[in-house]
Image (tube, rainbow, N blue to C red):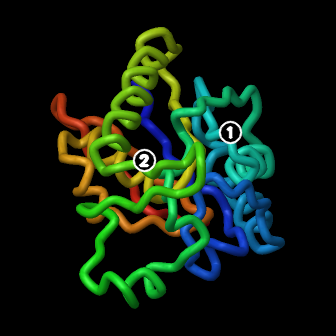
Amino acid sequence: MGELVLIRHGETEWSQSGQHTSYTDLPLTENGEAQARSLAPLLGSRHIWCVISSPMQRAQQTAKLAGLDRVRVDPDLHEWDYGGYEGITTRDIHRTRPDWEIWTDGVVPGPEGHPGESPEQIGARADRVLARVEAAFTNGDGGDVVLVAHAHFLRVLTARRLGLPPADGALFQLATGTVSRLGTEHGHHVLTAWNRLP
């Protein structure tokens, strides 16, 4: 069986500035495009069976520039809905909520259609994605399954894959334009590479 390969999209203006970005559909910066292109050598030697991307342009651009094709889009791979914290930095949030942690406190409601999500809701969404990943492995040809998505979501998904609660995504820092891999050892899900830059 192949590995589950996680790609965080390349840099955007807001990831560079530290602003929470979920439903704001920003493109990659020039640096983000370069980051995405630089992933191609890391992926080129791998046998990839299936590629699934977030619907956001920053993820789909990353997949294309990294040389991935036949990409399926899965709405469940979108970033944590930050609700009222969209576009706001953690530093700004701490001015009024100094003890705030997204991993335990979640977010405040935002505009219509964006009520925000709790860690538990993100965990449930990650579990749905992981069920589809397992189906892809079962129906596949032994190759890797690649997910192209966003930092907080991929961190929660990693926690869930390793049997941890959603809030333990806090343990897995994830930079833009990186590749990480989850595999198995003696029947257990394990990290095989993390936050790897070209």
Tell me the SS state at disc 2.
strand
Residue 154 visible within the image: yes
**Residue nearest the viewer, comparing 155 with 95:** 95
Residue type at numbered disc 2: Arg
Residue pointed to by mark 1: 55
Tell me the SS state at disc 1.
loop
Residue extending farthest top: 139
The disc placed on residue 42 is none
Instruction: Say which residue appears at 23% left-offset and 62% top-offset.
Output: 104
Rendered location of residue 55, percent (x, y) = 68, 39
Circle 1 Cα neighbour tier, 10 Å, few/some/many (<14 / 14–19 / ≥20):
some
Rendered location of residue 35, percent (x, y) = 71, 66
Instruction: Say which residue appears at 51% left-offset and 31% top-offset.
Output: 144
Residue pointed to by mark 2: 181
Residue extending farthest right: 30
In the displayed structure, 16 sits above or below 65; it is: below
Instruction: Say which residue appears at 48% left-offset and 49% top-offset.
Output: 115
The quarter of the rendered structure image containing the C terminus is bottom right
Mark 1 or mark 2: whose residue is earlier in sequence = 1
Residue type at numbered disc 1: Pro
Rendered location of residue 158, percent (x, y) = 34, 47
Rendered location of residue 129, percent (x, y) = 44, 29
Q: Quadrant of residue 22?
A: bottom right
**Residue nearest the viewer, comparing 32 with 84:** 84
Residue extending farthest front: 112
**Mark 1, mark 2: which one is toward the viewer?**
1
In the displayed structure, 140 sits above or below 181; it is: above
C-alpha separation, residue under disc 1 versus residue under disc 2: 21 Å
Instruction: Say which residue appears at 58% left-offset and 43% top-offset.
Output: 113
In the displayed structure, 117 sits above or below 100; it is: above
Residue 191 visible within the image: no
